[in-house]
Image (spheres, grey):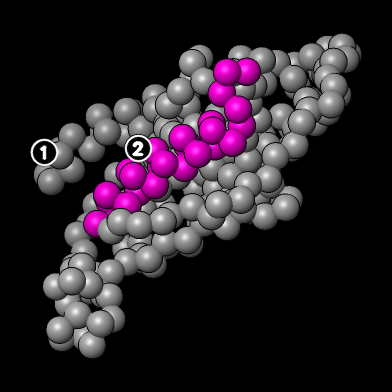
Amino acid sequence: MALEIAGYDKLRKQQEEGRKKGKYLGIGLSSWIEICGFGPSAATAPATGGIALVESAQVRVFPTGSVAVYVGTHSHGQGHDTTFPQIVADTLRHFEGERVVMISFAVMPNHVHALFVQNPEWPLEKLTQSWKRFAARQINKLLERSGNFWQRDYFDRLVRDGKHFANCVRYIRRNPGKAGLNDGEFILYESEIARTIELLRSQGATSC
């Protein structure tokens, strides 16, 4: 009865349609009460001796191109597993067609891979800064915190040729599977160009 009132079947259909477009809809069937941040340090300092009782978050960018996101919250059905990755995915496509053209990306629980073409008027450093600022604002809002979220450095690599481009697309596509992730535990976006890579290969054509 509760599922019928909530329109569970309709939500499942919306979830399936969203996945086709690279968006994941989390459906929660439980509630949870947890002790987390008690408030800003300005309010809790008198009782804690200056210790801030707020949630924490840290992002590390490694030389391999992987990005690890650490948050001081536990997922007990609140939707963190889908909400945080979706924020990152939406951020990567927020300036689509204006500052960047996204070819492919995979957002996983502990790192992100992205392949894109940037607008020459938007240097990579400026583009990356805009992504970080937008995502940090959204995630910090959910965590009810403020301050630095991303590390300052990042890792980038230029695509050398058509073969390298195709290999990058395949690597991003296969990475969630190699990490042992199941459907719903990652977000994979592929543009029309990226989706043709395997098709060209199966027809015997080159990927260049």
Query: Residue 140 magenta-drawn?
Result: yes
x and y percentages locating residue 85 in the rendered image: 45, 44
Q: Which residue is mark 1?
A: 5
x and y percentages locating residue 176 in the rendered image: 63, 45
Q: CA distance from mark 2 to mark 1?
A: 19 Å
Query: Residue 73 magenta-drawn?
Result: no
Task: Give left or right: position of 144 versus 71.
Answer: left
Is residue 104 in view?
no
Does the magenta stretch mainly form a helix, a strand or a loop?
A: helix
Would you say the residues marked 2 and 1 are in contact, meaning their CB atoms lie under 8 Å apart? no
**Disc 2 residue type (three-letter):** Leu
Report the front residue among 202 and 107: 107
Quadrant, the C terminus: top right
**Number of the front mark, 2 or 1:** 2
Q: Which residue is mark 2?
A: 25
- In this view, 110 is above or below 97: below
Picture residue at 28% right of the left edge, 58% below the top: 145
Q: Which mark is residue 91?
A: none
Work out whether mark 2 precedes mark 1 in sequence or the reverse, and give the earlier one.
Answer: 1
Quadrant, the N terminus: top left
Picture residue at 54% right of the left edge, 33% below the top: 126
Q: Secondary structure at mark 2?
A: loop
Q: Circle 2: is it few (<14), some (14-19), or many (20+) Cα within 10 Å?
A: some
Report the front residue among 200 and 73: 73
Task: Give left or right: position of 31 versus 143.
Answer: left
Q: Secondary structure at mark 1?
A: helix
Task: Give left or right: position of 25 versus 68.
Answer: left
Q: Quadrant of residue 116?
A: top right
Is residue 107 in view?
yes
Picture residue at 34% right of the left edge, 44% below the top: 137
**Disc 1 residue type (three-letter):** Ile
